[in-house]
Amino acid sequence: MFLKIEKLSEAIDRNVKDALFEDIGFGDRAEAIIPVRNVIAEVKCNTDHAILSGQFWFDKCFQFIDKSVSIEWLKKDGSQVRKGDKICRMTGQNLSILAGERSALNFLQVLSSTSTRTREYLSVLKESGVQNCVIVDTRKTVPGLRLAQKYAVRLGGGANQRFGLWDALLVKENHLITLGGLKKLANLIGVVDSKGEDIKLLQIEVETMKEYKLAMSLGFKHILLDNFSISELAKAVENRITGVTLEASGGINLNNILGYIKTGVDRISIGDLTKNIYSVDFSLRIVERGNS
């Protein structure tokens, strides 16, 4: 369908061009009434605590508009920031800074939200004392920001599940319905997919203990247990065949994740990391006005 897969640098360019296009369009009308001046501006955090993310997208907004805008970062991506912290200091023409302000701050808000939420989950994992569990994201991302949010999850301490349909095969419930169920899937054992990979080595989603046991008996080594209760997960871990990797998913949040961690599953995938955006507020203010 598409000829290539984006690199992160290419995604950043596309994200920023799209954001500037929808906000600036054919031009900023403020140019008609605001005289050009050289100014100094600062970005501050207005949220009690957050993990900063989005620096590359922020920089690129102003590189596209005006390469003469200079940005000095006082905090780096992955840093913990608090209310009142100065994030960066900017120098350049006022109209250039004003044109990129909203788009640049939007990237900081959304990506810092993702990193911050991820760090909250990782804090629960760390406090649990469990060493062999990994928190991973999902494909439930903001449209167009897949790589950006995957980047932000890693800054928050999480790991990435597959990046897209092109990246890995996860046989989900609708695939199984199309095939006619797990029993029909038995016909694929020993078959290789279009990329030459053994089907048994790919991931399969199950929704009941019966399906779980059947998946193991068919030789699948990577199993996602969808919407299993904590007690069911514990039982699944207890009865798994050696060498099988188990991932829990569905209905997991900050209030119940500790129970899932303690079941002994290898991975926990959480849509909340990327699909729910919690406010991380940043503001840009001109702090020194030069001559026009």
Image: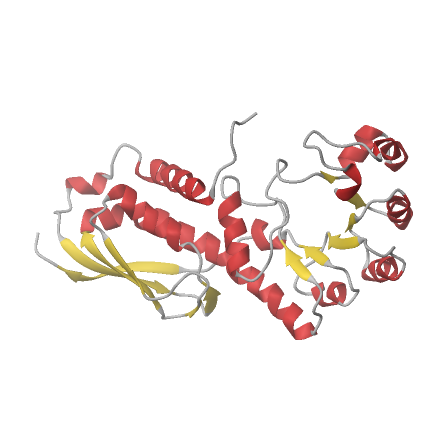
Picture coordinates of residue 31 (x, y %)? 18, 41
Left or right, residue 205 beside residue 139: right
Left or right? Give the position of 225 relative to 99: right
Residue 2 higher or lower than 52, as above or below: above
> What's the colour scheme?
secondary structure
In the image, what residue occupies the spot 74% across and 54% down?
247
Task: Using residue 244 as the reference point, say whether residue 282 is left or right of it.
Answer: left
Whether residue 133 is situated above or below residue 203 in the rendered picture = below
Q: Is 234 above or below relative to 66?
A: below
The answer to whether residue 46 is visible is yes
Going 38% across and 60% down the picture, which residue do you hit? 282
Vertical placement of 156 versus 292: above or below? Answer: below
Q: Would residue 203 be visible to someone looking at this image?
A: no
- Estimate the x, y position of residue 284 in percent, counting from the top left: 30, 58
* Quadrant of the image containing the N terminus: top right
Residue at the left extreme, as displayed:
291
Residue in view at x 71 percent, y 57 percent: 267
Between 42 and 181, the one lying in front of the other is: 181
Q: Position of residue 108 (x, y in %)?
A: 41, 55
Q: Quadrant of residue 191?
A: top right
Q: Residue at x 75, y 39 (%)?
A: 172
Image coordinates of residue 290 in percent, x first then y, are 11, 58
